[in-house]
Image: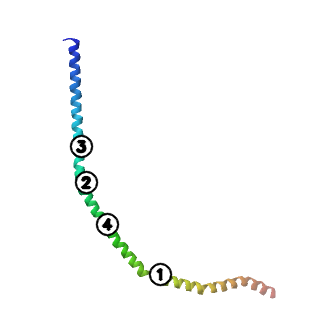
């Protein structure tokens, strides 16, 4: 056996190892692609379910919003009444507060005059 023969055998063995490694890698890639294929096949059904549930959620949201709007329309007169009562109480208490403030300002002056008279 000459050196050329040994070199050809080594190249053949290296080529065989490379071929086995590439076959193993391609087999793993095929397995991954089969998994992706299964996932892609299931996507339309899953998306249909998601869209159906999203539609139901939107419908429920619309119903809830309309109920809230109706309840707010029912409560609006009550809020206006509370506002009117607040305005009336402010109008009634404002003159009393001014009168009380004037009395408090005049009180020290009256005390000073009263002390001077005594």
Q: Nearer the viewer, mark 4 or mark 1?
A: 4
Depicted 62 relative to depicted 11: above or below: below
Q: Given contact means CB atoms under 8 Å apart, are the residues at marks 2 and 4 in contact?
A: no
From the image, tell me which residue sits under label 2: 43
Report the Cα–Cα distance between label 4 and label 3: 35 Å
Mark earlier in primary sequence (1, 2): 2
Sequence order check: which comes first, mark 4 or mark 3? 3
For the residue carrying disc 3, how many other residues have a C-alpha within 10 Å: few (<14), some (14-19), or many (20+)? few
Q: Going 22% across and 51% down the picture, which residue do you hit?
A: 41
Q: Which mark is residue 69?
A: none
CA–CA distance in space, label 2 to label 3 = 15 Å
Image vertical order of residue 50 relative to residue 60, above or below? above
- Picture disc at residue 57: 4
Q: Position of residue 91 (x, y in %)?
A: 59, 85
Secondary structure of residue under mark 1: helix
- Under circle 2, the secondary element is helix
Can you tell which mark lies on residue 79?
1
Quick one: label 4 or label 1, which is nearer the N terminus?
A: 4
Query: In whole angstroms, how far apart are the C-alphas of marks 3 and 1?
Result: 65 Å
Mark 2 → mark 4, Cα distance in angstroms: 21 Å
Q: Secondary structure at mark 4?
A: helix
Residue where numbered disc 3 is placed: 33
Identify the residue at horizontal 24%, vertical 55% (top origin): 44
């Amino acid at each position: 056996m000459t050196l050329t023969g040994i070199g050809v055998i080594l190249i053949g063995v290296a080529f065989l190892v490379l071929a086995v490694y590439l076959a193993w890698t391609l087999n793993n890639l095929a397995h991954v692609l089969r998994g992706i294929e299964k996932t892609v096949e299931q996507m339309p059904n899953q998306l249909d379910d998601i869209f159906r549930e999203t539609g139901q959620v939107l419908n429920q949201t619309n119903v809830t919003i309309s109920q809230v709007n109706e309840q707010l329309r029912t409560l609006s007169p009550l809020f206006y009444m509370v506002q009117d009562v607040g305005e009336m109480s402010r109008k009634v208490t404002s003159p009393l507060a001014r009168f009380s403030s004037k009395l408090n300002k005049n009180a020290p002056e009256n005390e000073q005059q009263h002390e001077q008279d005594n």
